[in-house]
Amino acid sequence: MRYRFSKPSNKVIPLNRNQIQQLSILSLLAIFVSMTFLILSQDKKLEYNPNDYIVLRKFERNLEVSGHTQGLHFLNSTHLIESCGSYENSEIHYINLDLLTTIFQRVSLDDIYQGQGVDVIDGQIYQLTWRERIIFLRDQETLEVLENRRLKIEVNESLGISHSYDKDDTLEIYITNGTDKVLILDSEFLLKQVIQVQFNNGSSVGRLSEIEFVNGILYASTNLNPIILAINLTDGYVQLSFQQIQEKLL
Ligand SMILES: *[C@@H]1O[C@H](CO)[C@@H](O)[C@H](O)[C@H]1NC(C)=O
Ligand SMILES: *[C@@H]1O[C@H](CO)[C@@H](O)[C@H](O)[C@H]1NC(C)=O
Ligand SMILES: *[C@@H]1O[C@H](CO)[C@@H](O)[C@H](O)[C@H]1NC(C)=O
Ligand SMILES: *[C@@H]1O[C@H](CO)[C@@H](O)[C@H](O)[C@H]1NC(C)=O
Ligand SMILES: *[C@@H]1O[C@H](CO)[C@@H](O)[C@H](O)[C@H]1NC(C)=O
């Protein structure tokens, strides 16, 4: 199956922060896809550097939906939740990857909010807003807001969200705030810990944006495009950084 991709518009506009984030998020999508690919192609003796990734699928959103991707999360192997747009046109919806560009269950945000990262925690969808410090808890079926929660920390921005459970099985929520830090919050959104993320060689990791916690590692996109960082949250060091090496559309 082939996923087509083309730019949503031909207008020439300088890259702004949102577009940079969008690129980063597309990269993050790509890594999940390429991991699937690597699993599927185990016996094909492909030569690749484990620090690299291959873009396998790109797809074009339905043109009715405008705005940059701000948050992306795999609900399951076929369905993505996407949070997109900016002030006055933010929305959240599902994308069915098996039916190519099928977007459904579209729900708009009020004009005063810009949607950001999304995650599913204990069966509920959490959606960040950019500068409003409001988190929407949404119903998984309808995507309607069940509850508004307030971020109780002094952050100018909130971009990416993910989570895991500590050794006592207590929920830890991870948030990026447009810096090189990952904020660890408790279930009441109170700050527990700040992790300074760094390369072993001391170079800056840039602005972290979209994040996904998988098997003990936090994967993050950054404005140092196009790379994806694998971060150990215990010490804050980047263990690996993945670079895009090619596009191999299936
Ligand atoms: C993924 O989630 C969607 C939406 O809830 C559901 O319709 C679909 O059947 C699920 N797919 C799989 C493979 O679980
Ligand atoms: C990001 O979060 C850290 C930790 O709470 C805080 O010190 C810093 O001021 C925040 N920066 C911005 C730009 O929000
Ligand atoms: C947060 O935003 C305010 C207002 O724009 C600014 O004065 C302040 O320096 C920013 N804080 C950080 C940590 O970037
Ligand atoms: C530090 O390591 C990162 C990741 O490998 C690399 O991108 C960066 O260029 C390095 N910085 C220096 C100064 O070597
Ligand atoms: C993360 O770093 C800690 C301390 O350096 C180490 O003990 C742990 O094994 C690392 N975790 C992973 C998943 O590599």
Image (tube, rainbow, N blue to C red):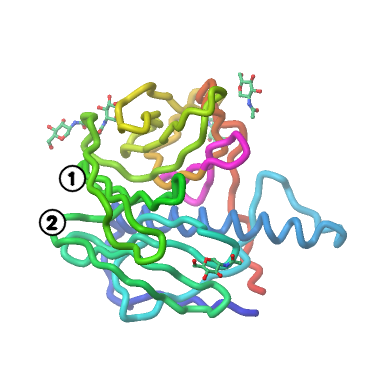
Main SS, magenta region, reads strand
Which residue bears the numbered disc 2?
A: 112
| Mark toward the start of the polypeptide (2 vs 1) | 2
Label for residue 250?
none
> Which three-letter amino acid code belongs to the residue tagged 1?
Glu
Residue 207 placement (x, y as % from top left): 37, 39
Q: Is residue 119 above or below residue 205?
A: below
Residue 175: image quadrant is top left
Per the image, the residue denoted by label 1 is 132
Answer with left or right where residue 48 lies relative to residue 116.
Answer: right
For image coordinates 37% across by 53% down, the residue present is 21
* Front residue of this view, candidates 210 and 110: 110
Q: Quadrant of the C terminus?
A: bottom right
Q: Residues within 10 Å of mark 2 (few under 14, many from 20)?
A: some
Q: Quadrant of ligand 3?
A: top left
- 149 horizontally vs 6: left or right: left
Q: Magenta segment, which residues? A: 213-228
Q: Secondary structure at mark 1?
A: loop
Specify the quadrant of the image occupied by residue 16.
Answer: bottom left
Q: Is residue 53 left or right of residue 146?
A: right
Residue 56: x and y, percent? 63, 66
Residue 224 is one of the magenta-drawn residues: yes
Image quadrant occupied by the N terminus: bottom right
The residue at 58%/69% (across/down) is 57
In the displayed structure image, the side of residue 208 where residue 48 appears, left or right: right
Answer yes or no: do the residues labelled 2 and 1 have beta carbons within 8 Å?
Answer: yes
Q: Residue at x 48, y 27 (%)?
A: 198
